[in-house]
Amino acid sequence: MFVTGHTGFKGSWLSLWLDRLGADVVGYSLDIPTQPSHFELLDLKIQSITADVLDKQRLITTIEKHQPEIVFHLAAQSLVRRSYADPVATFETNVMGTVNILEACRRVRTVKAVVNVTSDKCYENQEVLTGYAEDDPMGGDDPYSASKGCAELVSHAYRRSFLDPAKYRGSHSTLLATARAGNVVGGGDWAEDRLMPDIMKAASMGETVLIRNPRSVRPWQHVLESLSGYLHLGSRLLEGRAECADCWNFGPASESSITVEGVVGRARGLWDAVRYEIREDPEAVHETQFLTLDSTKARKRLGWKPVWNADTTFARTIGWYKQYYGAASIASADDVTEYERDAGRAGVEWAKE
């Protein structure tokens, strides 16, 4: 297994889950993005390579050396507000980084499957109440969202030009899919300008968190929900299921689309140290007000579905931070165990295997 961005929030959780499954994981990431770091706290015994996805030759050489069968591409500049401050780096990393990964994967013959993780923000947002489906147009009004839309277009072009599923096991032997998830939460996220980390950091220090977009609606889901989709999709690609070489939404149930203020209120109910103040900024950079995903395709064709509802998602997330700040220990492995058990009880397809 080759995972780019393995030191980040999603990447570290993915590396943990793969390690528990007995996979031989090679991680490739620019640096440790935050302090504290979930990846460092996990102390996983995996191969960890510090390098940039923009270094195309080193990327190709590294993948050639390790000969992985599957690549999960998560390396990205993932923050909307940072994309305004540094749009060039955002486009370079999210677009050319994707190009470099796909070039490397199509050159290394051992690579049988590629899961390119993009974002729910890749869609051309019309501020509508219905969820976006996979065949809706790409777009993006801010540099981050536009870069993720571009990453999807790059993947589509490579899939049609070089990795056409109709020519699988003919002119090539690699299946490429893209995956889009909602706003993920979970323990171990300390990224800047992200709602749950800001709430938890402020609570741990007895401070008041400032909320700038209280009415914005997002599809909130635990990080394990999105990762279960990526892993299930990756396993189907490795099985040679060419019909799965496509784009996929892995979003939460509709009841998990909640306003920012609603999320803060739930956090306050779960941890009485949470205090907040709404302070809207008329000069703030543009951010989408309403965004949700339609995951019907993944439900029907992959047998994937969410496991944890909003109550469980926020309880597990806030419980993780309370344990970390209160007892200096982490509950990540326990969360994976509980999630797998709950998926089994729910009869989710991947949990039966």
Image (spheres, rainbow, N blue to C red):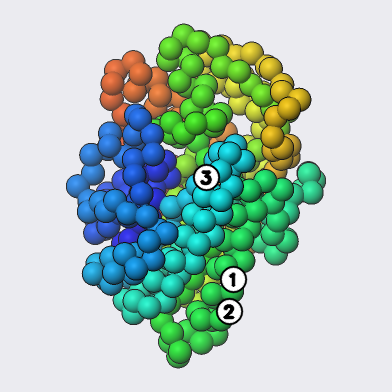
Classify 143 as above or below 178. Answer: above
Q: CA distance from mark 1 to mark 2?
A: 6 Å
Q: Nearer the viewer, residue 91 or 260?
A: 91
Instruction: Say which label, 3 or 2, has the lower sequence index.
Output: 3
Most extreme residue toward the left is 45
Q: Secondary structure at mark 1?
A: helix
Classify 244 as above or below 133. Answer: below
Instruction: Say which label, 3 or 1, has the lower sequence index.
Output: 3
Residue 297 on image: x %, y %: 63, 61
Q: Tell whether 291 sits left or right of 43.
A: right
Q: Residue at the spot x=70%, y=56% of the render?
A: 139
Residue beneath disc 3? 78
Please identify the quadrant where the C terminus is shown.
bottom left
| Total labels drawn | 3
Q: Residues within 10 Å of mark 3 (few under 14, many from 20)?
A: many
Q: Nearer the viewer, residue 314 or 36?
A: 36
Q: Residues within 10 Å of mark 2 (few under 14, many from 20)?
A: few
Residue 81 on image: x %, y %: 60, 37
Please identify the quadrant where the N terminus is shown.
bottom left
| Residue contact at pointers 1 and 2, CB within 8 angstroms | yes
Q: Secondary structure at mark 3?
A: loop
**Residue 229 can be seen in this image:** no
Q: Secondary structure at mark 2?
A: helix
Residue beneath disc 2? 160
Viewer-nearest of discs 3 and 2:
3
Q: Amino acid at mark 2?
A: Arg
Residue beneath disc 1? 156
